[in-house]
């Protein structure tokens, strides 16, 4: 054997001809190696994966722990000048001679075809990839010291694979120094001096090597990377050491095993060693036949390994690959597990080929492997707590992958998992329960907390999963696993489940109050969304204190009482809880209410989530949350007229207040409505007041009776005076009465309000004691309220007050009594000797009576001197009322007043008492002095217009004038003194009815001014003026509203119509009348310009509507308008409205118009006037003349249009085109467009009426005169598409270039200006063209602009015949393509005339068919049926290929109805057509053979031979069948024609040779298939016919006749040998004696036997005859060998059940 060096020399010499003649193929081989190495990987550094792969494929000595070590150094040990060198150390067996020869070749890997042996490399040039990072790789192994060079060898011109022996650098010593002297060098060392531009990439790859690289390597257990430099600070590679260790405790299952593998890393950058365990599941699957590929032909099994990391993956902070092909790819799957299999990789090794069928087969098995692995992890761990299994669910592929093909895997995993019992359920026992995801439900976290707390307190929860759903294990039911559970479709339990759970457990009473509240809070939070319509409302949930003090439960549904209120209450304040519970028991027989236990209420007060809970209890559950006051109200409402409870309730209020449970305000409000028990024992609910009990009261002493009873006062019963005990609390005597007085206002005199009735005691003398009691009562009431009228009157008028009258005692009413000092009394007696004064008897009452002066005043007692005067005055008045005062009486009164005045005595009271009496005679009858007037001359004018009461001089004479001072004191008016108000007050109703004097009118004006100064109404004065013709004018007396008081500045306006305006007569009233302008205005006189202008406008409008408005009026008005406009006066808006809207200006149209409807003509109007009718003002000499133009400014102000731009709106309304459009000058059209331009600029929109007017044909185009909407304006955007004569474009030569300036205006009136919008007009103009180039140009334009015709637009296409001839053809008669050239005579084929650019236009827009339709083909076929005797093969193939391609239900229907003939086989070159009713599909070749042999005419359908891809034979035959062609097997009628004579028959004694056990077993197994739906009895009955058969053999031929009925009525028949026959009715089986020898005879005999037996057994299930026949035929050929039949049945998944085995044993044992 040659030495390593000798081996290398031999290779160089023999293989590469080094030292001999140059091989001309060397250059090509060099380039092939270079290209393959460079293109193999997308990244330079993937050489590393190839090196690891090679190390894994290497062979290792026994006892060696396979390792791979990589060291990079900056030392140049090769002497090549490399800035860095990578060394790879591998302790394999070393390179053999074959390995050396392989590495010196391309594609000659020693590992090819060795996938079964575990080799993972396959490309054959893996080592050559190192040339991407090095120019000269070195190999030291088993004595070999060689290198390779990427540069071509000078001897061979070939690089990469020429080995060179290494004599010098590097030496083994150099290598060992780098490796380290601590151990011997590994067997193989590869040295790669790195290219300078690759160092960074290599270091990055080494630093980022995945620790999981060893995960699926079966050999390498150690892998390390480090950098060695003399200066360690230069190291940049992150050193790492990786090792793997397998726990070989495996579990075998379904051709799978599992184990745990541990990876550990030791990085220089991390002081701690990291480790991660991986649960590994490895399962084998047979390779599917359809998935085989050439690279893996020798592989029979797929081995799929799934790795589940049991901790944090060792990924060094990088993305972790999810797919391995022994080594990691760069596919990040987003799955939490790793998939390893022998995938076919892309050449880059970065990804697997997802579309490769080998890989697809592997991926299709991954779901099964995953589910098996997951089941192993979850359900087979018997002694492991469930909580430790839950993290395994993180392995589920919850997240979507970025690879769609992997998402298919994910969905299949999910689908399989949903059918597995993998979900751990909560059991509260040692027994684990796993169920399918669809059977398991989740609970809310808050309910889990409640259950856990309940379980700790002894609540039994063993029935948790017995309410219709299995409950997810609590360890699993957390937010952490939401994604997993959503992935598996584990849904929350429904709301009813919670109700069942709570009802079936003791959660309500079995837990502490705080946990009980948590339960209620859980229900509260979910009430509206989940529980309010469930059985939860019927679950006993709510606690309350029962009548006996026990805690009782109540469901929410029973909470509401008959009256709608809740039966359960709770207190808003904790301090009231016990108090309310105790008092509630006192009233329990009435309230039907109960309180929550004190412990529960106190717990709620401390509950952290009480807000939500209380809101639910109050608003949803309707628990009555009551305050102390609410409770008191509830008790009040429950009293229901019970006497004892009504009294108890007062005690309740008393103690509630005293113990501070209720506030004073609460108690007061309740006391105002509480029922009270009166002295008769009645419960009174309505009252107006309360009296203390009569026993010991003052009101009885004073009044003797109860006058308040009629007023609704309650006289309290004596029960309120007695002590009592309620709710354990004592009420002492008198305590309750004090409470009632304070809060119920139980009253006694003097605190009670008196009734509005007479005090009967006041009509008789009162004792001194009662008199003072009455005064005290009045004293008390005086500060509280007004005394009732009847009560006060009875006291005032009752004779109960003791007085002294002229020294004699007696009793008088207080209103007639006096109390004052004696000096005043003496004076009074002197002056009123005729009046007797009653004085209160102070000797009887003592000095104490003086303490009640105010009270005495209240009841009418008098104290003042003035009151004495009033008393006297009343006496005088009483005399006056009893009989009228005489003249002398009046003078006596006046003299008395004069006497008092002169004596300086106060006369006011006396005067006051008599001044209002009607005792003074006046012109208006008897009147009081006040308001009467003493007449003199100043009152002359006033007397004309007023009814003032003047003192009657005729009665009293002139003497009355001497008492002016006394009369004034009495209130008489003396002297006029500008007393205008008096005149106003007494104004006569018809003061101005008879042409009043000027003085009277002026007085009225002065009275009006006086009233206005004093802010008083003078409406009466105004009405007196307005109602009569009282003002004198130049037209006589007129109503004020008809009069004018003009100003000189605007008087000219009224002069226009001077006879229409009455003016105030200043001569009659004098100039003073001008000072009453405001008063005249108030009376209705027009004094201001604005109103005058309005009146003028009304007259103006009236005149304008009549014929009385002449030329002189117009000019006069314009003159006055100019004059007033030069003043400060402004015409009111309605003036302008009337003037501007009235039709008073004569126009050239012959009718008057309003100013705003007129135009003042100017030269600029001339062009447009020829095509319009405009309202120009008539400035002819016959009317206004040219002088009207002087008022240009005034006319403009009144609304007349002066400027052209302001009158364009009249143009729009006055359009009137001549009948002959050719008479319209271009200037007129341009002027009209200018008008439209102005209108649009000013924001006007063109009206429908205008659009209608211009819709006439008046625009000149190249196609004649047209309406705007039928015109186009040629512009730059049209030029690239069309020519000016391609459509109805406006004639720009006629209008000039100026027409282009009105592009927008033309567009507004309907002219099409954009090329994109002109399609319809261009299309409509097509009919005028006949030149093909023009039509093509138009088609291109329409196509580019996306034209689409309306539904009613005829779609026609020009079919040319030369360049200028042709015809327009409907699109329905056209087709774009005719691929097979079949329709030349039927349709117009456009591809013969037009370029392809227009095909889309023809198809989409003009609805031309791209290809002939099914209907077209049917019409063509019908033509062929009628006209052609034969079809060519190409015609027939093309037709049916099209039908096959476009086959559908619709096509089937069309062909079935319209095709009557189909092609039949023919021996000639042509194909014949025959009626489809006389042609058959040869689905039975035996029958076809028989009929073809016997009939000269073909009766079988044609199909192409050989078959063509576009028309598969099976597809064509299926089409024939569906359009009505019959199958031969279904159409033929079979008839046995052999008559067997008994003498010819020989019974077979051993029929078991024919009908044997094997046959019956096979048939029973077939019949047992579930699809047959036959029970054991039915199966056995079916085969009994075979057991009962008598088998006969005959020498004669057994024949059968086959007949076909044709459409003509003829019968085609043929006879054939049948060999055997089964007469079912006679249970006889006839067999023609078997011919000897020959395979044909044997297969024929087996086929007929199988067919006859199958038809007999399956008479009622004919659809299964063929399947059974095939099985029997196979078994027959195998002579029904037991083992062979058994294998056959297993291969077909057929088995015989125990009951059928028993039947067979019994049948053949008896035989």
Image (cartoon, rainbow, N blue to C red):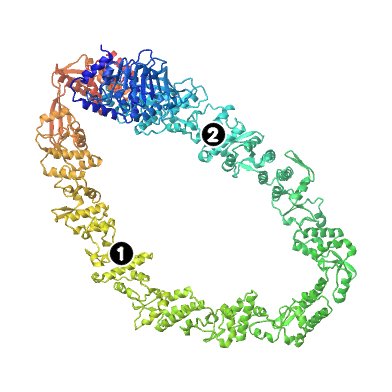
- Element under label 2? helix
Residue 1252, numbered circle: none
Residue in the foreground of this view, choosing between 1126 and 792 = 1126
Residue 1090 falls left or right of residue 955: left
Residue 231 rendering spot, x and y as whole percentages: 43, 24
Q: Which residue is mark 2?
A: 446
Residue 1084 rendering spot, x and y as whole percentages: 55, 78
Q: Residue furthest top?
A: 1
Which quadrant holds residue 710?
A: bottom right
Q: Which residue is mark 1?
A: 1302
> Split into 4 quadrants, where in the image is the C terminus?
top left
**Residue shown at 70% from the left, 86% from the top:** 936
- Element under label 1? helix
Q: Is residue 189 visible?
A: yes
Residue in the foreground of this view, choosing between 468 and 1327 = 1327
* Rendered position, 787 above or below 1534: below
> Split into 4 quadrants, where in the image is the N terminus?
top left
* Rendered position, 1599 above or below 1379: above
* Rendered position, 307 above or below 1709: below
Residue 1554 falls left or right of residue 265: left
């Amino acid at each position: 054997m040659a030495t390593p060096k000798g081996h290398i020399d031999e290779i160089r010499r023999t293989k590469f001809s080094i030292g001999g003649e140059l091989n001309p193929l060397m250059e090509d081989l060099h380039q092939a190696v270079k290209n393959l190495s460079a293109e193999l990987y997308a990244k330079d550094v993937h050489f590393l994966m190839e090196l690891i792969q090679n190390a894994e494929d290497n062979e290792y000595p026994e006892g060696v722990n396979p390792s791979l070590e990589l060291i990079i150094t900056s030392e140049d040990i090769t002497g090549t000048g490399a800035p860095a060198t990578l060394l790879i150390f591998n302790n394999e067996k070393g390179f053999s001679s074959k390995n050396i020869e392989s590495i010196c070749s391309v594609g000659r890997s020693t590992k090819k075809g060795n996938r079964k042996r575990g080799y993972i490399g396959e490309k054959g040039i893996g080592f050559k990839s190192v040339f991407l990072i090095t120019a000269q790789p070195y190999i030291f192994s088993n004595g070999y010291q060689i290198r390779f060079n990427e540069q071509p060898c000078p001897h061979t011109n070939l690089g990469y694979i020429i080995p060179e022996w290494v004599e010098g650098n590097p030496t083994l010593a150099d290598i060992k120094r780098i490796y380290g002297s601590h151990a011997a060098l590994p067997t193989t060392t590869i040295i790669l001096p790195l290219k300078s531009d690759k160092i960074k990439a290599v270091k990055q790859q080494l630093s980022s090597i995945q620790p999981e690289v060893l995960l699926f390597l079966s050999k390498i257990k150690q892998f390390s990377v480090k950098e060695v430099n003399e200066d360690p600070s230069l190291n940049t590679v992150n050193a790492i050491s990786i090792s793997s260790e397998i726990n070989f405790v495996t579990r075998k299952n379904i051709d799978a095993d599992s184990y745990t593998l541990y990876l550990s890393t030791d990085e220089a950058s991390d002081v701690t060693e990291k480790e991660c365990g991986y649960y590994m599941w490895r399962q084998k699957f047979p390779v599917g036949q359809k998935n085989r590929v050439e690279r893996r032909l020798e592989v029979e099994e797929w081995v799929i390994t799934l790795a589940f990391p049991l901790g944090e993956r060792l990924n060094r902070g990088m993305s972790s690959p999810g797919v391995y092909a022994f080594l990691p790819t760069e596919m990040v799957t987003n799955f939490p597990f790793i998939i390893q299999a022998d995938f076919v990789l892309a050449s880059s090794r970065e990804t697997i080929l997802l579309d490769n069928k080998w890989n697809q087969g592997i991926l299709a098995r991954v779901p099964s492997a995953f589910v098996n692995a997951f089941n192993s992890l979850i359900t087979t761990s018997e002694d492991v707590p469930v909580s430790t299994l839950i993290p395994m669910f993180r392995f589920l592929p919850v997240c979507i992958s970025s690879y769609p093909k992997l998402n298919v895997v994910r969905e299949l995993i999910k689908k399989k998992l949903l059918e597995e019992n993998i979900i751990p359920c909560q059991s509260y026992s040692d027994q684990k329960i796993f169920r399918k995801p669809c059977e398991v439900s989740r609970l809310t976290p808050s309910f889990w907390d409640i259950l856990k707390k309940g379980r700790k307190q002894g609540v039994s929860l063993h029935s948790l999963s017995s309410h219709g759903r299995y409950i997810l294990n609590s360890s699993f039911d957390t937010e952490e696993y939401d994604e997993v559970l959503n992935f598996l479709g584990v849904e929350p339990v429904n709301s009813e489940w919670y109700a069942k759970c709570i009802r079936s457990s003791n959660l309500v009473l079995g837990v502490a109050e705080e946990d009980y509240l948590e339960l209620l809070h859980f229900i509260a939070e979910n009430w509206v969304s989940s529980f309010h319509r469930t059985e939860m409302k019927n679950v006993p949930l709510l606690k309350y204190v029962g009548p006996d003090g026990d805690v009782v439960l109540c469901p929410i549904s029973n909470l509401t009482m008959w009256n709608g209120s809740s039966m359960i209450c709770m207190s808003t304040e904790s301090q009231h809880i016990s108090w309310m519970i105790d008092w509630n028991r006192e009233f329990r027989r009435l309230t039907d209410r109960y309180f929550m236990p004190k412990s529960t209420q106190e717990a709620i007060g401390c509950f952290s989530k009480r807000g939500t809970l209380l809101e639910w209890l109050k608003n949803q559950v309707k628990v009555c949350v009551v305050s102390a006051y609410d409770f008191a109200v509830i008790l009040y409402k429950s009293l229901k007229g019970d006497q004892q409870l009504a009294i108890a309730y007062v005690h309740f209020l008393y103690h509630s207040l005293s113990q501070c449970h209720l506030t004073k305000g609460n108690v007061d409000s309740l006391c105002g409505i509480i029922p009270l028990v009166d002295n008769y024992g009645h419960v009174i609910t309505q009252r107006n007041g309360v009296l203390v009990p009569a026993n010991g009261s003052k009101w009885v002493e004073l009044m003797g009776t109860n006058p308040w009873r009629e007023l609704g006062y309650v006289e309290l019963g004596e029960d309120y005076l007695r002590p009592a005990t309620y709710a354990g609390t004592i009420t002492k005597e008198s305590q309750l009465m004090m409470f009632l007085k304070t809060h119920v206002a139980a009253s006694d005199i003097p605190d009670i309000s008196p009734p509005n009735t007479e005090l009967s005691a006041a009509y008789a003398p009162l004792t001194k004691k009662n008199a003072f009691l009455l005064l005290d009562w009045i004293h008390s009431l005086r500060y509280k309220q007004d005394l009732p009228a009847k009560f006060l009157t009875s006291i005032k008028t009752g004779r109960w007050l003791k007085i002294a009258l002229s020294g004699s005692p007696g009793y008088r009413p207080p209103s007639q009594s006096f109390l004052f000092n004696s000096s005043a009394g003496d004076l009074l007696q002197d002056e009123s000797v005729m009046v007797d004064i009653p004085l209160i008897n102070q000797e009887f009452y003592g000095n104490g009576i003086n303490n009640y002066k105010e009270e005495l005043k209240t009841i009418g007692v008098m104290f003042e001197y003035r009151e004495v005067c009033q008393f006297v005055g009343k006496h005088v008045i009483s005399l006056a009322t009893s009989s009228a005062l005489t003249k002398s009486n009046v003078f006596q009164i006046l003299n008395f007043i004069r006497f008092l005045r002169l004596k300086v005595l106060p006369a006011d009271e006396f005067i006051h008492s008599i001044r209002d009496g009607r005792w003074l005679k006046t012109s208006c009858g008897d009147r009081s002095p006040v308001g009467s007037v003493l007449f003199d001359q100043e009152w002359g004018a006033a007397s004309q217009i007023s009814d003032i009461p003047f003192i009657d001089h005729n009665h009293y004479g002139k003497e009355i004038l001497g008492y002016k001072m006394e009369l004034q004191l009495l209130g008489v008016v003396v002297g006029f003194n500008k007393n205008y108000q008096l005149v106003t007050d007494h104004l006569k109703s018809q003061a101005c009815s008879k042409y009043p004097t000027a003085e009277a009118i002026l007085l009225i004006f002065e009275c009006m001014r006086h009233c206005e100064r004093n802010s008083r109404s003078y409406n009466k004065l105004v009405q007196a003026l307005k109602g009569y013709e009282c003002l004198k004018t130049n037209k006589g007396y007129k109503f004020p509203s008809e009069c004018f008081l003009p100003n000189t500045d605007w008087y000219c306006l009224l002069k226009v119509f001077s006879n229409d305006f009455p003016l105030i007569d200043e001569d009659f009233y004098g100039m003073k009348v001008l000072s009453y302008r405001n008063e005249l205005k108030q009376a209705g006189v027009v004094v201001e310009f604005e109103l005058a202008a309005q009146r003028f406008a009304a007259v103006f409008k009236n005149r304008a509507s009549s014929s009385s408005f002449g030329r002189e009026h117009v000019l006069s008005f314009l003159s006055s308008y100019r004059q007033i406009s030069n003043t400060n006066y402004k015409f009111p808006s309605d003036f302008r409205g009337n003037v501007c809207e009235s039709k008073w200006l004569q126009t050239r149209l012959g009718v008057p118009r309003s100013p705003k409807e007129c135009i003042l003509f100017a030269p600029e109007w001339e062009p447009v006037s020829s095509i319009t009718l405009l309202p120009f003002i008539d400035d002819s000499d016959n009317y206004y003349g040219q002088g009207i133009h002087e008022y240009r400014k005034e006319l403009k102000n009144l609304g007349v249009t002066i400027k052209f731009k302001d009158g364009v709106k009249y143009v729009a309304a006055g359009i009137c085109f001549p009948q002959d459009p050719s008479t319209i000058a271009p200037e007129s059209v341009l002027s009209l467009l200018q008008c439209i331009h102005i209108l649009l600029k000013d924001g006007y929109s063109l009206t429908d009426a205008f659009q209608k007017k211009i819709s006439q044909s008046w625009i000149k185009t190249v196609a004649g005169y047209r309406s705007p909407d039928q015109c186009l304006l040629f512009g730059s955007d049209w030029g690239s598409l069309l020519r000016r004569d391609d459509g109805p474009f406006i004639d720009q030569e006629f209008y000039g270039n100026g027409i282009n300036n009105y592009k927008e205006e033309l567009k507004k009136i309907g002219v099409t200006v954009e090329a994109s919008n002109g399609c319809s007009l261009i299309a409509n103009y097509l009919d005028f063209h006949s030149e093909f180039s023009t039509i093509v140009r138009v088609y291109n334009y329409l196509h580019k602009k996306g034209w689409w015709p309306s539904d009613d637009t005829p779609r026609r296409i020009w079919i040319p015949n030369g360049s200028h001839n042709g015809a327009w053809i409907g699109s329905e008669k056209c087709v774009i393509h005719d691929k097979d050239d079949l329709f030349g005579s039927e349709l117009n084929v456009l591809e013969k005339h037009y370029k392809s650019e227009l095909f889309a236009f023809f198809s989409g827009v003009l609805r031309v068919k791209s290809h002939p339709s099914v209907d077209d083909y049917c019409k063509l076929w019908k033509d062929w049926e009628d006209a052609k005797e034969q079809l060519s093969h190409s015609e027939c193939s093309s037709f049916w290929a099209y039908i096959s391609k476009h086959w559908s239900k619709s096509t089937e229907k069309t062909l079935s109805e319209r095709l009557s003939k189909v092609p039949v086989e023919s021996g000639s070159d042509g194909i014949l057509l025959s009626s489809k009713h006389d042609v058959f599909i040869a689905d039975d070749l035996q029958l076809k053979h028989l009929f073809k042999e016997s009939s000269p005419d073909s009766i079988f359908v044609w199909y192409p031979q050989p078959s063509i891809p576009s028309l598969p034979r099976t597809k064509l035959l299926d089409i024939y069948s569906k359009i009505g062609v019959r199958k031969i097997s279904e159409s033929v009628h079979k008839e046995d024609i052999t008559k067997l004579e008994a003498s010819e028959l020989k019974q077979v004694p051993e029929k078991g040779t024919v009908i044997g056990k094997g046959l019956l077993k096979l048939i029973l197994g077939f019949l047992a298939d579930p699809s047959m739906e036959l029970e054991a009895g039915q199966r056995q009955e079916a085969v009994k016919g075979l057991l009962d058969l008598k088998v006969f053999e005959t020498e004669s031929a057994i024949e059968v006749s086959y007949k076909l009925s044709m459409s003509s009525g003829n019968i085609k028949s043929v006879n054939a040998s049948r060999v055997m026959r089964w007469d079912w009715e006679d249970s006889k089986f006839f067999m023609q004696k078997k011919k000897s020898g020959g395979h044909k005879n044997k297969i024929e005999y087996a086929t007929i036997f199988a067919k006859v037996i199958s038809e007999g057994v399956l008479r009622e299930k004919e659809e299964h005859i063929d399947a059974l026949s095939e099985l029997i035929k196979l078994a027959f050929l195998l002579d029904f060998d037991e083992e062979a039949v058994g294998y056959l049945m297993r291969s077909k998944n057929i088995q015989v059940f125990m009951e059928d085995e028993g039947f067979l044993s019994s049948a053949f044992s008896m035989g």
